[in-house]
Amino acid sequence: MKFGRKFLLLGILILSFSIWLQACGTGNSSNGSSGSKDKLIVATDATYAPMEYMDDEGKIVGIDIDIVKAIAEAAGFEVEFKNYGWEPLFAAVENGEVDFAVSSITIDPDREKTFDFSDPYFVANQLILVPEDTDIESFEDLKDKKVSVQINTTGHKVVKGLLGNTSLDIVATETMPLAITEMLNGNADAAVGDNSVVLEYVKNNPNVELKTIEDASFEKEYYGLMVQKGNNEVVDLLNEGIKKIKEDGTLKKITGLDIE
């Protein structure tokens, strides 16, 4: 029995030493012990072409995705994108389930109460989409109309400002394509959304008789990368990358825009 115990104890010691060695060889790659980069997990809503969407092979692609990849390359980290959907991605960031989110997210005071944001990387504005034969000519003309929007977007916010927070004339959907579909099906008189997405839909559907309306009341909006409140380390890392791709012209090459 004593002989067996000695071998058992020796085996435990060897196993413990092996586990300790493995532990010493792991850890955050940012400490320089490894040639690999840190990987940050990124939530998105891949239904928002051309900003973020799924290609024919099921990969998440788009302008936002290209921008984040450029930021990551410039700042020296890797990224993994996960398609959460619009509403769930906010909870994922707030709970620390992901490191940040990119999904054409406008920086606004209400969101800044709950989240931190990177510096702006894209400028946009709202656009009205209507059937070609409509009598709607401005945002004010929507006062007595039904309007479809993507829920909890800035488009939803501006329409609530016009029609009221609890208006039954607001048709709020999970995605912008669904909001446009509601209008096409006659369940809304107009759809309101970010200009990049609305224009992309019009471009890809030339046989659908639609027109877009710009309105002077729509202010410019600035997209930012959304981070868990207080996570300054990630914000600083993202801002480092954004600064570099602004300075070297990469951001303008991707977007075609000058972003201050």
Image (cartoon, helix red, strand yellow):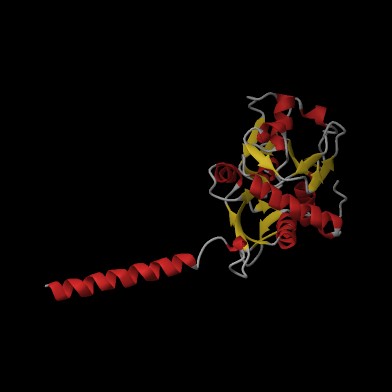
Q: Which residue lies furthest to the left in this view?
A: 1
Between 24 and 47, the one nearer to me in the picture: 24
Residue at 73 percent across and 39 percent down: it is: 107
Between 62 and 38, the one nearer to me in the picture: 38
Question: Residue 44 at what x, y percent from top left?
Answer: 63, 51
The image shows a total of numbered marks equal to: 0
- When asked about the image quadrant of residue 112, the answer is top right
Residue at 67 percent across and 31 percent down: it is: 110
Between 215 and 171, the one nearer to me in the picture: 215
Q: Left or right: where does residue 236 sit relative to residue 123? A: left
Question: Residue 64 at what x, y percent from top left?
Answer: 72, 54
Image position of 168 with respect to 134: above or below: above
- When asked about the image quadrant of residue 113, the answer is top right
Q: Can residue 126 be seen in this view?
A: no
The quarter in which the N terminus is drawn is bottom left
Q: Left or right: where does residue 113 sit relative to residue 247? A: left
Question: Residue 156 at what x, y percent from top left?
Answer: 69, 34
Image position of 226 with respect to 28: above or below: above
Q: Is residue 183 visible?
A: yes
Question: Residue 83 at what x, y percent from top left?
Answer: 59, 54
Residue at 63 percent across and 64 percent down: it is: 37
Q: Left or right: where does residue 55 sit relative to residue 258? A: left
Between 171 and 183, the one nearer to me in the picture: 171
